[in-house]
Amino acid sequence: LASVSIAQEVLPTFGYRPAQIRIIDQTILSTAASETPHTLLEMILVDADFDILGTEAYQCRSDDLRRELAAFGTTSSDEEWCRTQVDLLETHRYRTRAAHRLRDPGRQRNLELARGLLTACREHMAPSPCRSRMVPRPCRSRMVPRPCRPPMVPRPCGSRMVPCTCRRRR
């Protein structure tokens, strides 16, 4: 990983000893998807790396990642993207008790939302939620009818935000 190379190059200039740098390198390497964290420090860093999965900001960051990947030439259909998100949310497990307690309920909510979006993709139901008046609620596990509240709402299975065209507001 590039971050390990950077750490090995830069940390000695700050007075870090080789033994300390090895610990830092191993901690960084533990965040790779194929690795399993073993120490508490590694577990904390892996949990921090995946913290977003359990937050209300998850969908926005997921959309940001999709746009970034597309900018570098990696594209996927809406259904493929939704499937990948469901797989990630289903398989991820927080490593520390604190992260499990603080973030797992949010991860479960995001998983249910992602499953709903995947179902919508499979049924080719990706209209603007403002037109259908079905809006995903981050605090609920399903799509619910309600007038659009925010001025921008996530488009089911879409990689962008769309302006809300509803006239009704709460």
Image (spheres, rainbow, N blue to C red):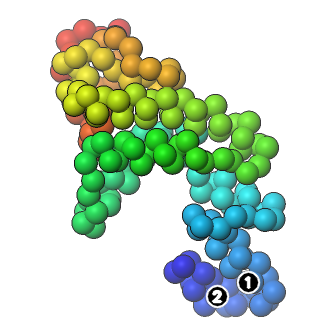
Q: Residues within 10 Å of mark 1 (few under 14, many from 20)?
A: some
Task: Report the residue at 81% width, 60% height from top.
Answer: 40
Answer whether labels 2 and 1 touch (C-beta < 8 Å).
yes
Give the percent coordinates (x, y) of residue 9.
60, 90
Quadrant showing the N terminus: bottom right
Q: Amino acid at mark 1?
A: Ile
**Which structural element holds mark 1?**
helix
Of 90 and 170, nearer the camera is: 90
Q: Quadrant of residue 142?
A: top left
In the rendered structure, the answer to whether residue 170 lies left or right of residue 23 reads left
- Relative to 75, 1 lies left or right: right
Q: Closer to the camera, 41 or 104?
A: 104
- Residue 8's label in the rendered image is 2
- Which numbered disc, 2 or 1, marks the residue that appears first in the sequence? 2
Amino acid type at image mark 2:
Gln
Q: Which percent across, then down, holds residue 56?
A: 51, 34
Could you say which disc has been placed on residue 21 in the image? Answer: 1
